[in-house]
Amino acid sequence: MPTHTRIRMFNTKDTYPNQTLDNDLCQAVRAGNTVYVRGQVGTDFDGNLVGLGDPQAQTEQAMKNLKQLLEEAGSDLSHIVKTTTYIIDPRYREPVYKEVGKWLKGVFPISTGLVVSALGQPQWLMEIDVIAVIPDDWPAQ
């Protein structure tokens, strides 16, 4: 019996067609009552970038992705316990964190924020990954 469930498996050659990668990954993993979600950016699940040059719009799309992935895993945004947010310019902190704050109002996760020199694609301005739980009394999916 598997120890975890993989959600939305994919290969990196589809995500990064401009690079010679060939790695099998997934968007989220549910292990017991914990959900680990891969870093989400301003790209929808069809591969379309939302918000070219706009960190707030990219964050909104990333949060939509997180919401959908957590629900597919049997959790939701209110069960996020940790966020890690990456931005490529410190000036993006305010629009990115304001947008994340809209989605996580009243959740109170722990949070790490990093300014990095680049992300996996040059058009990505931010990325956020999360860890969430599924409470014992949460309705089964």
Image (cartoon, rainbow, N blue to C red):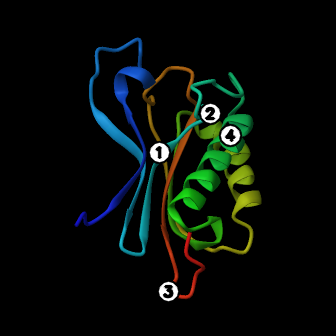
Q: Which residue is mark 2?
A: 44
CB of mark 1 within 8 Å of CB of mark 3? no
Which label's residue is closer to the chain start, 1 or 4?
1
Q: Residue furthest left?
A: 1
Viewer-side residue, 74 vs 35: 74
Q: Which residue is mark 3?
A: 136
Q: Which residue is mark 1?
A: 39
Residue 72 location in percent, x, y?
55, 57
Decide if residue 111 is in sight here.
Answer: no
Viewer-side residue, 53 vs 93: 53
| Location of residue 139 with respect to 104 vertically, above or below | below
On residue 61, the disc is 4
Mark 3 vs mark 2, foreground winner is: 3
Which residue is drawn at the image coordinates 22% and 67% (left, top)?
A: 1
User: How much space separates mark 4 and mark 2, taking CA atoms?
Assistant: 7 Å
Q: Within 10 angstroms of label 4, few (less than 14), some, or many (20 or more) residues?
A: many
Residue 134 location in percent, x, y?
50, 75
Mark 1 vs mark 3, foreground winner is: 3
Which label's residue is closer to the chain start, 3 or 4?
4
Q: Within 10 angstroms of label 2, few (less than 14), some, or many (20 or more) residues?
A: some
